[in-house]
Image (spheres, grey):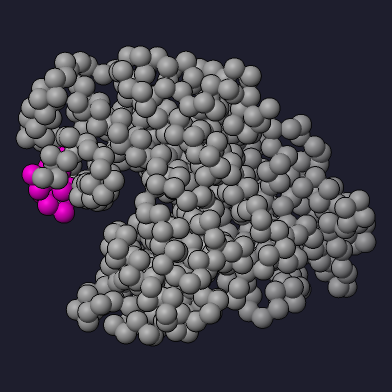
Amino acid sequence: MADQVFVRHERHGDVHVLRLANPPVNTLRHALRQELVAALDDATAAGAKAVVLIGEGRMFSAGAEMTEFGGPRLEPTLTQVIDALDAFPGLTVAAIHGHALGGGLELALGCRARVAASSAQVGLPEVKRGILPGAGGTQRLPRLIGAEPALALISTGDSVPAPRAKELGILDAIIEGDLAEGAIAYARAELAAGREHPRARDRAVAGDLAAFDAAASGVAKRARGMEAPPATAEAVRASLTEPFEQGLATERRLFERLVKGEQSQALRHSFFAEREAQKVAGLEGIDARPVSRAAVIGAGTMGGGIAMSFANVGIPVTIIETSGEALQRGLGRVEANWRRSVKSGRMTDQEVSQRLGLIRGTTDLAELRDADVIIEAVFEDMEVKQGVFRELDRLARPGAVLATNTSYLDVDAIAGVTSRPGDVLGMHFFSPANVMRLLEIVRGKATSAAALATAVAIGRRIAKVPVVVGNCFGFVGNRMSFQRGRQGELMLQEGALPWEVDKVMTGFGLAMGPFAVADLAGLDIGGMVRKAFGIPFPIADAMVAAGRLGQKTGKGWYRYAGDGRTPEPDPETERMILEISASLGKTRRAIPPEEIVDRMTLSLVNEGAKILEEGIAARASDIDVIFVNGYGWPAWRGGPMWHAERMGLRAVRDRLAELAALTGDEGLKPAPLIERLAATGGTFARPG
């Protein structure tokens, strides 16, 4: 690494090209920043009239090197690099391919002009890490595109494709063909024409302060407890109300506050946890099998969403159903989902046609013979699934990966009916499967390393976050959530009402409360699982028996009048809860908000500790990835295990013991791993 060159300097007459060379994504590490400033000095000394910045490899730059966060600021900082660009006497052009994100886009904003390949994307996603752009992005972007459009991009962290970026004014030109050659030609043409390209810092900001403040108020309302989005509004507002240098100082002050805060630490934990989850024991040096075609058994909501995930990335997929009517209904749902994306502007009609062309529907199970991966997504019943896998064993080609999308059932029992258990595993998608990022990959006792490596590679390819877990009831996410659901049931028996619990948990940061989520999914889903495993929840079971199944029946824990989607507290639900609570001999009490939060979160942590000790999850951070990406846990709280580490495991142990004594619930007694770690001062990440 000591001999690595991070900036390659090429001379093309009076136009010099500086290539960022820090693979794979050209993060702006300290050594690269040093070499970039030195290269700018060299170009100035050589009399260059223009400098083109371009990235090698996959992209222009993914931005800051996150491993440097929290440490001392090493000079030159990115701000000082951009100052050097500002000081360059000639034209500076950023030539963008792939992505220019975060500090990468801030570097480009520091150039006097920006060009890009038509396939490029640009964005300032820092808010998703709990911070804001800290190298002038909140001051330069408004000077290029206006304060309100800049706020919309910075407060959401969304990226925009190159054509849209040009419309906004972020880019000056789209380059077709070779990007470096096109950027050099662009620079020469601009020099020859004598066109002015003022620095971003010297431009006026377009925007009305009253209109901006109204937009900023909307950002604050949508933040749901996150500190970074309102801070981005404050920083961008400074571009309207303060001189450039003073605006930079405001940005830096806000950045420093956020980067030291717990929310940013939690979001950075989530970022690195996703990376760690891709390191799977036993797969070192194992190659994934090639996958060129997929098949999905079942055209229901889940099966259709899984098929969309394959078609979205260009993989042909066959959907197989038992009847033509069910098949057409499923294919119609798939097309309708994509058509909604066209209406919202996220897709074009041509893209929909291309993706529909990748999906083939059939009622003939033998049509899966050429598939490299087959995913079963039928009714959650062991006999039904085993029947499907007997047929897969007979029909699928040798070496095909056979995956079940089961949420709770024993993957080994499903694999056991085949003659090739090494090819069988779980691929647990989350609904809607074409949207949700999480993919739990369940390793059975006989699953081969090659099959597992293939499933992980498929997960990455279809834009999921794959997390490998062991085989047990509910695996990781549903097993832990079952314990949280149990606490919800018990609190209803003891004195709480569903909307009281939901209000507390949305205040904690969940987008929806657990009872509202149950209504959305359908109360019969949980009821079916409890019945299959003989685990009664008296109040929840009574709701199902009364036909109160959630949104789809217009009533569940809540009632749904009007648009059929807005939950309203229902007196009938309250009456049922009070009657059943009395029949169970419960003396109802007011349950304080802090108890609700602790029972709904620490029940997860306690079960997570058992899962870790059993080896069902490889790392505590894997559990956090699962809950942030699949179960609505607020990313800015890092995940349940991170939450417990922030509390301190001694405090977690003591609170669990206190709750167990208060409620008489043995299920809240601290898990043995928590007891040991609390006694020794260890953590989930560092047990020793």
How many numbered markers are drawn?
Answer: 0
Observer-nearest of 488 and 24: 488
Q: Is the magenta stretch mostly helix, strand or loop?
A: loop
Q: At which x and y percent is residue 101?
A: 61, 54
Magenta segment boundaries in residue numbering: 546-563
Using residue 589 as the reference point, say whether residue 442 is left or right of it. right
Residue 389 sits above or below residue 561 on the image = below
Q: Would you say residue 648 sits in the magenta stretch?
A: no
Q: At which x and y percent is residue 661?
A: 35, 14
Q: Can residue 304 be seen in this view?
A: no
Observer-nearest of 85 and 665: 665
Residue 333 sits above or below residue 67 on the image = below
Q: At which x and y percent is residue 181?
A: 75, 77
Residue shown at 84%/66% (left/top)?
Answer: 16
Using residue 36 as the reference point, say whether residue 379 is left or right of it. left
Residue shown at 70%/58% (left/top)?
Answer: 284
Q: Would you say residue 554 sits in the magenta stretch?
A: yes
Residue 657 sits above or below residue 377 on the image = above
Q: At which x and y percent is residue 457?
A: 58, 65
